[in-house]
Amino acid sequence: MKKIRLIAVLLGIFLLASGCQNLQKKTDTQDTWSRIEKRKTVVVGLDDSFVPMGFRTKSGKLVGFDIDLAKAVFKLYGIKVDFQPIDWSMKETELRNGTIDLIWNGYSKTPQRAKKTAFSKPYLKNRQVLVVKKKSHINSFKQMKGKILGLQTGSTAATWYDGKQKLLKAKSTVLYDTIPNEFLDLNAGRIQGILLDEVYANYYISKQKDKNSYQVIINDQVPADYFVVGMRKGDKTLQRKINEGFDILQRNGTMQKLKTKWFGTTQ
């Protein structure tokens, strides 16, 4: 009887797992535009501490370039954007599970992410830079040798650093949930450098009282990356609608106005 019960339990687990896999596969391949259009809401997942793409003001209001851009795109279709803060290291899982419809928050296009996620066309050029304190006298990527480097979990910086690159080899790394926590440790001397997106570094530092105490180090050998919107593989209509929206906003000048507003340039 014990053997029969064990077999029954194992069979149940197998069937449940198979059912979950089939449901997951169905979710990944579905085109959900009709559902989004019917409920007139699309759910965007983001890290709400990522300046200047999507972040909270002191009053708690959610603002940023990606916030304005997402609203402008979906306004064209009469659809409201519901911004959902998520654990950035779990972004693809949240998308796959259907908790969110889009990843839209300084999300870089990479070969690793392309295996799980479909992308919009690129809308902003970016690159990874090293931020240090000037008093550290670190002036290049190579000078981080023997030092401690901060990285955000699940970030493009972390993916690039862990890849085959040979430009930056620190003594050790510390992973953080959010970039502001990296800056806290950099200021306290617990780490000596942060590898992160240039758009974040420039904006964040420009808002600090001691902005002249930081140095942003650029290495021309670090390849540029491009921000895109991430979505499930099956969302072909959603992908087309976003791309068409970008084209419209480019033609009518909205895209340039937003870039000037948040970056002071057309990027």
Image (cartoon, grey):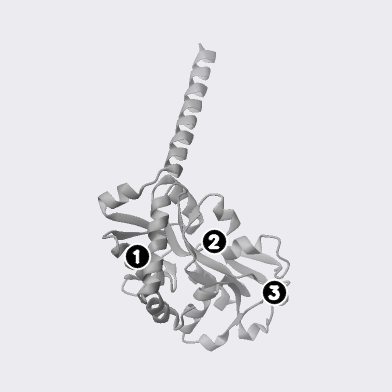
Q: Where residue 63 sits: x, y (%)? A: 35, 71
Using the rendered image of the protein, determine whether residue 45 is visible from the camera's viewpoint. Answer: yes
Residue situated in front as seen by the camera: 45 or 209? 45
Front residue of this view, candidates 20 and 26: 26
Residue type, numbered disc 2: Lys
Disc number lying in front (3 or 2):
2
- Residue that protrudes farthest toward the bottom in the picture: 212
Residue 73 is tagged as 1
- Give above or below for 77 relative to 36: below
Q: Which residue is mark 3?
A: 144
Q: Earlier in the sequence, mark 2 or mark 1?
A: 1
Labels 3 and 2 touching (C-beta < 8 A): no
Quadrant for residue 223, please give it. Answer: bottom right
Side of 156 where 82 appears, left or right: left
Name the image quarter holding residue 111: bottom right
Residue occupying the point 50% across, 52% down: 117
Residue 132 lies, in percent from the top left, at 61, 79
* As drawn, 234 above or below 223: above
